[in-house]
Image: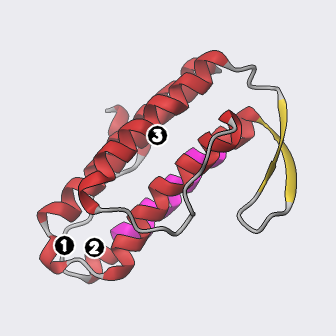
Amino acid sequence: MKEKLTDLFEYTYHFNNEMIKIISENISKIDEKTISLINHTLNAQQVWNSRILHEKSFEVWQINPFENLQDINNQNFQKSIQIVKNSDLDQRMSYHNSKGAEFENTIFEMLFQAINHSTYHRGQINSQLKLNGIEPVLTDYIFYKR
């Protein structure tokens, strides 16, 4: 299971970098919604990591300096891999969501949420890129594995 999660975080890291790259290369055509979505995608992974590690988290919709996005993606990746390697994935943890409500899930469920959430928002970013006349990035997992 840990090997599969590591693979999925490598996939997530790779395509988050590809999204940052295409946005950077086309910054003059990029709208505010795209900037908001790429930030939210990275912020959410940071938030899930911080819940597991009991660290201070970002706000889910905060806008980070664009030049920091690759570093944030790298830090997210490193922390997610650290969690996978050092945690009992079946351990249940309590945490509070961004509205303060308390929930409990396994570490696996929390990590998978971070991966799935990133995939969802990269699809939204691709839609925004297309609307702005930019060729979307093929981000399907199967393309990554070929």
Which residue was labeled with disc 1? Answer: 134
Q: Give the extent of the magenta segment.
A: 113-127
Say whether residue 49 is visible.
Answer: yes
| Depth order, front residue of 6/142 | 6
- What whole-number distance in Å separates the C-alpha atoms at marks 3 and 1? 27 Å
Would you say 55 lies left or right of 97 here? left
Q: Which residue is mark 3?
A: 76
For the residues labelled 2 and 1, the Cα–Cα distance comes to 5 Å
Name the residue tied to disc 2: 129
Residue drawn where x is 14% and y is 69% of the image:
26
In terms of secondary structure, where does tag 3 sit?
Answer: helix
Q: Classify the position of the N terminus by image quarter.
A: top right
In the image, is residue 120 part of the stretch drawn in magenta?
yes
User: 49 or 144, which is in the foreground?
Assistant: 49
Name the kind of residue labelled 2 in the image.
Leu
- Distance from the alpha carbon under mark 2 to that under mark 3: 24 Å
Circles 2 and 1 in contact, beta carbons < 8 Å: yes
